[in-house]
Structures are given as structure tokens and as C-alpha cells.
Image (spheres, rainbow, N blue to C red):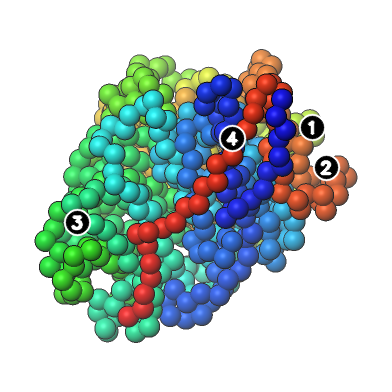
Amino acid sequence: MPSIAPCSCIYGVLVLFLVTGSFAGDPYVFFDWTVSYLIASPLGIKQQVIGINGQFPGPALNVTTNWNVVVNVKNHLDEPLLITWNGVQHRKNSWQDGVLGTNCPIPAGWNWTYQFQVKDQIGSFFYFPSLNFQRSAGGYGGVIINNRDIIPLPFAVPDADVVLFISDWYTKSHKKLRKDVEDGKDLGVPDGILINGFGPYRYDEALVHGGIAYQIINIEPGNTYRFRVHNVGISTSLNFRIQNHNLLLVETEGSYTMQQNYTNMDIHVGQSYSFLVTMDQTASSDYYIVASPRYVNSSKASGVAILHYANSQGPASGPLPDPPNEYDMYFSMSQARSIRWNVSAGAARPNPQGSFKYGQITVTDVYVIVNRPAELIDGKWCTTLNGISYLTPSTPLKLAQQYNIPGVYKLDFPNTQMNRHPKVDTSLINGTFKGFMEIIFQNNDTTVQSYHLDGYAFFVVGMDFGVWTENSRGTYNKWDGVARSTTQVFPGAWTAILVSLDNAGIWNLRAENLDSWYLGQEVYLSIMNPEIDKSEVPLPDNTIYCGALSSLQKDQARRYSFSCAPSPAGLSRTFLVVLIITLYGPFFHATAS
């Protein structure tokens, strides 16, 4: 038997293929991350941002269906940290979800190693820090899960990927922003819009100051690129468009869509889309890439990057491409309804997506979840769902469940708005394992709210303005509603989703808008398999303990050495082929105007 050398980390990523005569095993990919503060000037003003390995935004996780991902996270911030993986389902492994319901935070100066499999998933996702308003300072990056070679893409293979993070941005620190929210102050209009952590190209000298670095995307004429676009912002819906180029929508948050051309797309907080963009213009000049705020009365600049053809004959100039009517939510809702699931395409598995006929499944549980804007409860500003503002216990829910600690939470979240005064509580949804749940989000706030469910993709089957009633089910799309993990709910409107509860664990359902989430607009679903499931991932050996279990915490010092994943069964008959992957970004660079 050949010897196995210890793993090491070069450029932060190492891939180990498990080989048994052929490439039959699921590879392990290793990342070594240091999360720390950086000084940057995205809008021309020096400020503190959160970076990973000195990068803002952070490095990408570029993996393939069923790969095992190991990420060693060192917290060099001055406050606790958790990283969550927006849209990654962590099948039977909510221990890795990176939210306070499943994990104790990583204290400042400590590290923790995440280990999870991207089981039966493809698509475009992102990660971000889930605590203390930290996402408003950065710390985010992309997650790309590629198809296995045996499953073809439902479109021609693009020439390359382009990943774009669009976000509203404030020059206040995340600590000042969260203090404002705690004090009941409105966040106000953002100071600007960033694209990949950069400020806008100087398309208007009156709006954009000189000396601001901006993003340039270098492309070759005639090529087709897959643009993976994520709204990683705080609370602002953004309209994305590329001057003189169509956006062919092909995927959203792990589901292949019917392929339709759009001239622009409203992307709400926490949402991700993939577009194919063909470089079919004459390149008489560069072209604008634009992310502009929606439903915000702002005189501030839009986010603007530059699409630069190799044969471009000059810089971009003139006005930006027109956005939709600034306050036309009917346009945005109509656009959202037009996004359909590609029922004939295979994704993570060879069988067509549409072979899961969700419209024929009997609903077992119905929850009408009504939000309310921030209000005072016992002297503190809180937001609520069904009259409850979530109270985070000192012991994570998943650990309390594992150790049978009483009194940490209750399984009594109401299935509709209660006729009582709002309260602060730790109340969970008691989901039925392998049940089929209908959730209706009713937005009583004055702004667009996005809601995200960890651990699952759900089917968006309906949305409309007004109050949802049982008669609204007659409008549901029961055939090709898109499956995704984050949906928008317009003010004074409702959105209905259906979800198959086949992933055991405790899973976070939250507002993606940071101000709403931070003040309590979240709830957890407890999905318990009543039978012993040996495939469910057990309590990790490196678990951090807190709250009622603090006495179980082991010495942290031993965790500072980056270590390989546990050896799989049968390793004595397996040898390792090590492939070092070094990824460069040939399409990206920044300049200042």
C-alpha cells in the first residue's frame, strides 16, 4: 500500500481525489481562510471592510456536484464570527449551516473548520458572515457548483464564467449601522452601489467623484460568458443590466430555468442568477454594466462597471441604459412570474428536473407568515413574524436538541398571525419529516422583503398584491414554478412557496434584509426523522460549545493546525492523487477614473 503524505495548502486550495482504479470517489477540496479587517475606499472614502485572505470580496469556492468541501476559517476580527452558505443545502448536516441556531460562534482569535458535501446540487450561490450585521462590511464570496461531466448543461458550454457581486453600500461601519438599527433609526438611502467591491465608473462627473476604482470585465468578441450575479447587499433591490446586450436567463440558485432573454433583471437581496451574455456588438466603445437601486428616491450614483471588448475603440460614454420605471412594482412582479423552471433539463442528477411533480403532492402543513415593521417590544426595537420576534438562546438549538437540554426552545410557532400583543420568544416550526409544507409570506412592511430558507430549495408557486386568501390557490403555478432558496415579497403583497421537507435538521428561515433579520425576523424549522438514520451526519468532533454546554469546550490551541478531512471508510484500499488548483481571474481588473 502506498504511503499517504499529509495534506498542505497552496494558494488556499487543495483537491484530493479518492481513486479506486478509476475516478470513482467524491473529491475533497480544502480551503484555508483568514477573515480580517482591511482598509478600502470603495466609494473614495477610506473605511474598514471585512476581507478573506486579504481579498474583498473573498475567494470563490469552485467545486462540482458531490464534492466534499473543507474550509478552515480563522477569525481575526474583534468579535465572534460564523460563515453561512446561502443556498447550499448541507444534506442531513445542519451542523455546518453557520447560523446561531446550529452553531456556537467562532470567538475572536479562534478558528473552526467547516466540512460539508455539496450533495446533489448545481448552480450559483454565495457565502457571507451571518452575525452582527457583518455582511454590510463584506466577508462575502461566491460558491459555484458545476455539473458532473456525465450530465450535460442544457446550453452550450460558455467560454468562461464572470462572477459579479452587486450590493448597496454605506460608508458607516457595520457596528455603527447595527447600533442605528438597534436604536430604531432607518438605514436611509445607501451611499452608493458596489460591483465586486468597487465603486462606480465616472459616467457622470457631477455624481461620481474622481479617483474611485471601478471594475473592468475584459472579454473577447464573439464569445459567450456565463454571468453569475448575486445581490449580497443589505436591504436594497437592484436592477441589473448590460448596455446593448441581452441577458439570457439560464439558472437561479441551483435550478435551470426556461431560457428567456431579458434586457434587465430586478435582483432582490440575497438572490442569485446566471445569464448567458454573447459579445455580439461592434465594440465601437466599451459598454456599461449597471446595478441601480429600485424603489429608492436617491440622487446617489448607480453601480457601474465596464465591459471591455479586446477590440474596443474607445471608452464608454453617454447616459446609462434606461432602467424600468423606478417605482413600478407591477413590472417587477410580472418579471418574477415570468421565470419558469426548465422541467426537461437534468441538473445534479440525470433525470429531468420536472420528474419531481410538486403540483401533485398533498400539502401536510400550511403556514401563513405575516411580517410587521420594527416596533417597540419591552423597550427594544424588534421585527416580528406572526407576532413573534425571534430570541436567540445562549445554547444553539441543534446542540440543545442533541443533548436533550430542556427549556431552550418551544415547538409552538403559530401557523398564522395571532390576535395578541407581539412578543420576543424562541419558538420553532415543528415540521413533519417528509411532509410537504405550504408557506405564504404576507408583507405588511413598506419595502420589498426577501425570505430565505436554509437546507432546501422551495417552489415559488404564486405572488400577487393584496391579502392572500384560500381562493388565491387558484392562481398557483403547479407545473413549472422555479425552485430556489430566496424569494421576494413586495410590500402589500404575498408570495406562496411549497417545500418538500426531506432534509432532517434544524433550518433557518429568515429575512435576508439585514435590518429586518437583525431585529428578529427569523424562525427555525425543526425537521426530525423519527427513525434512526445512519446517513445523517453526527455531531462534529470539532464542535464549539457555548451556553449551557460551555463546560464541554476543549482546548482551542490544537485547532490552529490546518488538518485533512477524516479518512473515508476503506481508505486502506484507496490511494490519493493530489491536484493543486490555482485559479486566476483573467477577466477582472480594476482601474480608477
Q: State the residue at coordinates (56%, 21%).
A: 21
Q: Which residue is mark 3?
A: 221
Indicate which disc residue 220 carries: none
Left or right? Give the position of 217 relative to 113.
left
Q: Percent from the top left, x then y, of residue 256? A: 32, 34
- Is residue 121 shown above or below 253? above
Give the spatial CA distance, label 2 vs label 3. 59 Å
Disc 4 packing (10 Å; few <14; some 14–19; many ≥20): some
Q: Which residue is mark 2?
A: 549
**Amino acid on which the number 4 mark rests in the picture:** Val
Q: Outermost residue toward the right? A: 551
Q: Which residue is mark 1?
A: 403
Disc 2 packing (10 Å; few <14; some 14–19; many ≥20): some
Left or right? Give the position of 137 relative to 326.
right
Q: Which residue is mark 4?
A: 577
Q: State the residue at coordinates (42%, 76%).
A: 43
Residue in the foreground of this view, choosing between 5 and 392? 5
Secondary element at tag 2? helix
Disc 3 packing (10 Å; few <14; some 14–19; many ≥20): some
Give the spatial CA distance, label 4 vs label 1. 39 Å
